[in-house]
Amino acid sequence: MDPQPDRPPAIDPGEHHPPSRPAEPLAAALHEGAEALRRANLAAGHGLVDVVEVYDALGTVTTLVDRLPPIVLFTQRCALARGTTGLRDDSGRDPGERLLEFVAVLTLAHTALIGAARSLGRSHAALSHIHRRPAHT
C-alpha cells in the first residue's frame, strides 16, 4: 500500500514531460479514477477490518484491475497509429526505436494486468466461501 498525502504533488520545473491535460475526456476520467484510488488507499491505511467484510471491496478492486488492460491496448494503438512523423526523441535516440520499446513494455504491462485480474478474481471467488459462524444465544 502506498499512502499518499492529501496535497498535490510538487511540480519539478526541470521535468521534461509534457503536462497532462485533464480537460480531455479520457485524461479527465483517468485522473478522477486515480484520485478515487488514492482516497481508497488512504482509507485502507486506517486499521484492519474483518476479512469477511472486505469481499465487496475486493470485488471492486478486481473489476478495476480487469478494466485496465483495454486502456493499455488503447495507448499502444495510439503509439502505432501515425508512425514517427513529426516526432523526436529528446535523448537523441531514433523515435521509432523508442516507440517500439514503449509498445514492448506496454505489452508486458498488459500481460501482467491480465494475470493480476485473473488472480484477483480467483481470490474473490475463494473469499466468497468464507463466512462468520452464527453466534449461538
Image (spheres, rainbow, N blue to C red):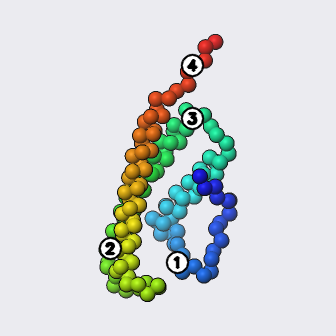
Which residue is disc 3 drawn over?
A: 51
- CB atoms of marks 4 and 2 within 8 Å: no
Which residue is disc 1 drawn over?
A: 17
Which residue is disc 2 drawn over?
A: 80
The residue shown at (52%, 27%) is 131
- CB atoms of marks 3 and 1 within 8 Å: no
Q: Secondary structure at mark 4?
A: loop
**Sooner in the amino-acid sequence: mark 3 or mark 1:** 1
Cα gap from disc 4 to disc 2, whole angstroms: 57 Å
Residue 10 in picture, x, y percent from top left: 65, 71
Compare residues 31 and 44 and report the one nearer the observer.
44
Compare residues 62 and 92 and report the one nearer the observer.
92
Is 82 displayed left or right of 18 in the figure? left
Q: Secondary structure at mark 3?
A: helix
Amino acid type, label 2: Leu
Q: Is residue 37 above or below residue 26?
A: above
Cα gap from disc 3 to disc 4, whole angstroms: 16 Å
- Res 132 → quadrant: top right
**Residue 37 in view here:** yes
- CB atoms of marks 4 and 1 within 8 Å: no
Q: Secondary structure at mark 1?
A: loop
Is 104 displayed left or right of 24 in the figure? left
Q: Secondary structure at mark 2?
A: helix
Which residue is disc 4 drawn over?
A: 134
Amino acid type, label 4: Pro
